[in-house]
């Protein structure tokens, strides 16, 4: 398997926007957290999280081939089929690759959720995850105008696939992101 540095280099080769890298770091941290929780391969899960959107700056949408193009990019770079399949499964509705493994189900659930958690933290005075609770995320969840690009149905489907309660999934995702909040542009408020 490739090193983290090699994977970061590959991601940055295809994505110049810092915002995309921050999202990749958030998903990497969440996948690492859940791999530890479930006793799974931490390096594999984290790297899948880091590279899941490798094609985003190129494609910008599922209509333009995301995540299928990403799967092709990863194959060409030498990543294995388990890795590629996981990346494809996070776009199940478009790639046709159903999340089956625990890793795939987790990625499917937390990709959108990391975005929502980050968005909620950004509108708080502290801009921090340190004082963010799941109930605050659930309150914003109901406001469909807030973080409108976050597909809440995907998160709910993912939680069901994982066999985990949504509130627990939100709480765990917050905990997963706390250690890296500065790296993802949070914790800069009052």
Image (tube, rainbow, N blue to C red):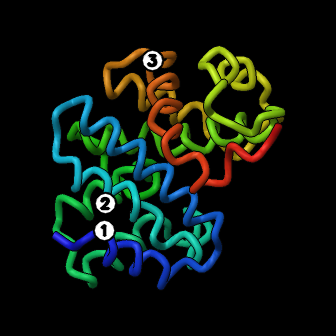
Kindly indicate the quadrant of the structure image that contains residue 21.
bottom right
Residue at (44, 26) in percent of width and height: 172
SS at badge 1: helix
Q: Nearer the viewer, residue 189 or 142?
A: 189
The quarter of the picture where the C terminus appears is top right
98 to 135, vertically: above or below: below
62 vs 102: above or below: below
Q: Which residue is mark 1?
A: 4
Q: Earlier in the sequence, mark 1 or mark 3?
A: 1
From the top left corner, tell me how far across and down residue 159 is, in percent: 42, 25
Q: Give the left or right position of residue 92, taking residue 26 as reference.
A: left
Which label's residue is closer to the chain start, 2 or 1?
Answer: 1
Spatial distance from mark 2 to mark 3, Cα to Cα? 23 Å
40 and 53: which is toward the camera: 40
Disc 2 and disc 1 in contact, CB within 8 angstroms: yes
- 90 left or right of 79? right
Q: Give residue 50's quadrant in the image.
A: bottom left
Which quadrant is the N terminus positioned in? bottom left
Q: CA distance from mark 1 to mark 3?
A: 28 Å
Mark 1, Cα crowd under 10 Å, few <14 / some 14-19 / many 20+, is some
Q: Quadrant of residue 130?
A: top right
The x and y percentages for residue 183 are: 57, 56
Mark number displayed over residue 47: 2
Residue 88: where, in percent of width, then height?
35, 58
């Amino acid at each position: 398997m490739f090193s983290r540095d090699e994977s970061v280099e590959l991601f940055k080769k295809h994505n110049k926007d810092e915002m995309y890298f921050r999202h990749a770091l958030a998903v990497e941290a969440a996948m690492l957290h859940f791999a530890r929780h479930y006793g799974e391969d931490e390096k594999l899960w984290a790297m899948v999280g880091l590279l899941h959107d490798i094609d985003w700056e190129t494609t910008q949408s599922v209509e333009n081939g995301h995540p299928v193009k990403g799967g092709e990019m990863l194959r060409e770079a030498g990543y294995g089929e388990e890795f590629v399949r996981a990346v494809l499964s996070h776009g199940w509705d478009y790639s046709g690759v159903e999340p089956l493994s625990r890793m795939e189900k987790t990625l499917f659930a937390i990709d959108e959720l990391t975005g929502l958690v980050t968005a909620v933290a950004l509108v708080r005075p502290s801009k921090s995850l340190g004082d963010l609770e799941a109930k605050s995320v659930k309150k914003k969840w109901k406001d469909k105008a807030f973080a409108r690009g976050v597909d809440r149905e995907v998160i709910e489907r993912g939680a069901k696939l994982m066999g985990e309660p949504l509130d627990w999934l939100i709480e765990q995702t917050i905990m997963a992101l706390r250690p890296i909040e500065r790296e993802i542009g949070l914790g800069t408020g009052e």
